[in-house]
């Protein structure tokens, strides 16, 4: 399913993983301060329309040490809440203060999110460093360096979400959407298929290929001009004549 650029309408489906504190990422994606999302379990579904383009954003719950099993279930379910699947996933890593050191727990949780959704999710993921006010470039670089493993797995795609005195919320929104659209274009409009759907498609494809192969074999057997058949028949006749003489 191809997805047009933000200037051309169509649809964009996004899942946000990680701790999106104060809904900064959702607000930036939708360019909206007053969110009216719908709760589905521990996930929240947001929908909006911009310039004729429908944007669906699923916000998965952040990692919670007190309820790890429940969180795992919700993360797996989150990609099914924007059917048939998200075009992009934003893996959020918070950068809170200038002196804030990268959290090992946060990085481990981010890697866990990725593993829960299979390796296929990597080509649809952008790592998003969500910065609080006052965070300087040095703190951002520390977090980028600490996330090196995740960045490598995701093709080194990342975006720094940071308020700027020279950029309006609309400009920040456009920059983020431009990065997402670039990813979608690179994937030729393909989207991440939830594991259950992916396995079903694989089974149907295998079954279809098996039926096609059986039909080819049947057609080969039914074809009276089959070269192999006549070659075998001629060889048998020649052998019979030689034996006779």
Image (tube, rainbow, N blue to C red):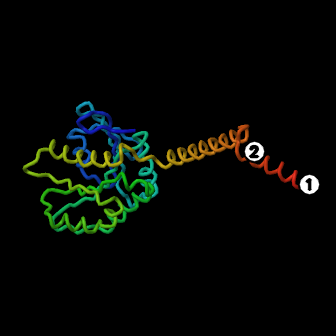
User: Would you place residue 93 above or below residue 32 in this image?
Assistant: below
Mark 2 or mark 1: whose residue is earlier in sequence: 2
Q: Residue at x 7, y 49 (%)?
A: 166
Q: Position of residue 186 (x, y in %)?
A: 32, 49
Q: Position of residue 202 (x, y in %)?
A: 54, 47
**73 horizontally vs 21: left or right:** right
Q: CA distance from mark 2 to mark 1?
A: 23 Å
Q: Secondary structure at mark 1?
A: loop
Q: Residue furthest left?
A: 166
Q: Residue at x 34, y 50 (%)?
A: 89
The answer to whether residue 183 is seen in the rendering is: yes
Q: Position of residue 55 (x, y in %)?
A: 30, 38
For disc 1, the marked residue is: 245
Q: Residue at x 26, y 30 (%)?
A: 52
Badge 1: few (under 14), some or many (20 or more) residues near its Cα, within 10 Å? Answer: few
Which of pointers 2 and 1 indicates the residue nearer the eye? 1
For disc 2, the marked residue is: 230
Q: Nearer the viewer, residue 244 or 16?
A: 244
Q: Position of residue 21 (x, y in %)?
A: 26, 52
The answer to whether residue 78 is seen in the rendering is: no
Q: Quadrant of the C terminus?
A: bottom right
Q: Which mark is residue 192?
A: none
The quadrant where residue 96 appears: bottom left
């Amino acid at each position: 399913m191809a997805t047009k650029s933000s200037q051309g309408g169509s649809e964009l489906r996004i899942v946000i993983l990680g701790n999106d504190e104060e809904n900064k990422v959702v607000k930036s994606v939708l360019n909206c301060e007053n969110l009216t999302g719908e709760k589905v379990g521990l996930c929240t579904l947001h929908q909006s329309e911009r310039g004729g383009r429908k944007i669906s954003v699923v916000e998965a719950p952040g990692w919670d040490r007190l309820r790890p099993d429940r969180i795992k279930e919700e993360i797996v379910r989150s990609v099914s809440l924007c059917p048939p699947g998200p075009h992009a996933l934003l893996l959020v890593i918070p950068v809170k203060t200038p002196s804030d050191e990268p959290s090992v727990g946060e990085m481990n949780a981010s890697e866990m999110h990725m593993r829960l959704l299979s390796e296929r999710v990597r080509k649809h993921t952008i790592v998003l460093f969500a910065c609080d006010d006052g965070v300087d470039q040095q703190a951002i670089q520390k977090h980028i360096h600490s996330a090196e493993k995740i960045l490598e797995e995701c093709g080194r795609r990342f975006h720094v979400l940071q308020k700027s005195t020279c950029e309006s919320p609309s400009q920040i929104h456009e920059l983020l959407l431009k990065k997402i659209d670039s990813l979608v274009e690179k994937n030729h409009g393909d989207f991440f298929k939830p594991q259950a759907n992916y396995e079903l498609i694989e089974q149907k494809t295998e079954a279809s290929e098996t039926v096609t192969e059986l039909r080819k074999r049947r057609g080969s057997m039914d074809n009276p001009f089959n070269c192999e058949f006549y070659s075998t028949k001629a060889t048998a006749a020649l052998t019979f004549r030689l034996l006779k003489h």
